[in-house]
Amino acid sequence: MLSCKELAHQHASDYLDGQLSPRTRLAMSFHLALCTNCRRFLKQFRAVRQLLQSRSELQVDEKTESEVQDLAARLHDSYRQQKNNSSGL
């Protein structure tokens, strides 16, 4: 089974792009079925990717750029905190 670290750092992007081998996709699906934190991470990661993809179509001023960077930092911090809390169980 994949670890949370492998899922987040090695496979999340390819998973969302549909570019995993059938074996790795099955391992991801199994892990996601069991791991609430990774499901939450993948949902947040998907939302950030969609935001960034749509951002290229928008006129972005400095304030909006700062808000996007702040959101990304908060999501990353939230994931780390959830990861640390779950590993202490």
Image (tube, helix red, strand yellow):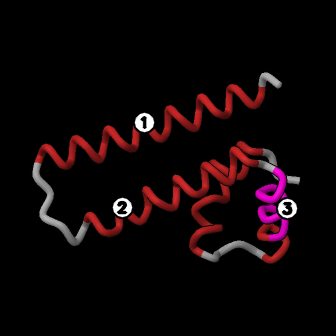
In space, the residues marked 1 and 2 are separated at their CA atoms by 15 Å
Majority secondary structure in the magenta region? helix
Element assignment for label 3: helix
Question: Pointer 2: what residue?
Answer: 51
Could you tell which of marks 1 and 2 lies nearer the N-terminus? 2
Q: Which mark is residue 30?
A: 3
Element assignment for label 2: helix
Question: Pointer 1: what residue?
Answer: 74
Residue 25 image position (x, y, % from top left):
77, 70
Query: Quarter of the image containing the C terminus?
Result: top right
Residue beneath the point at 84% across and 52% down:
34
Element assignment for label 1: helix
Residue 1 image position (x, y, % from top left):
89, 53
- Look at the image and give the residue range highlighted in magenta: 26-34
Mark 1 residue type: Arg
Please tell me whether residue 32 belongs to the stretch shown in magenta.
yes
In the displayed structure image, the side of residue 81 where residue 74 appears, left or right: left
Mark 2 residue type: Leu
In the displayed structure image, the side of residue 1 where residue 6 appears, left or right: left
Residue beneath the point at 77% across and 62% down:
28
In space, the residues marked 3 and 1 are separated at their CA atoms by 28 Å
Question: Label 2 crowding class (10 Å Cα cut-off): few <14, some 14-19, many 20+?
Answer: few
Residue beneath the point at 85% across and 61% down:
30
Mark 3 residue type: Phe
Task: Note whether 73 is above or below 2 in the view shown.
Answer: above
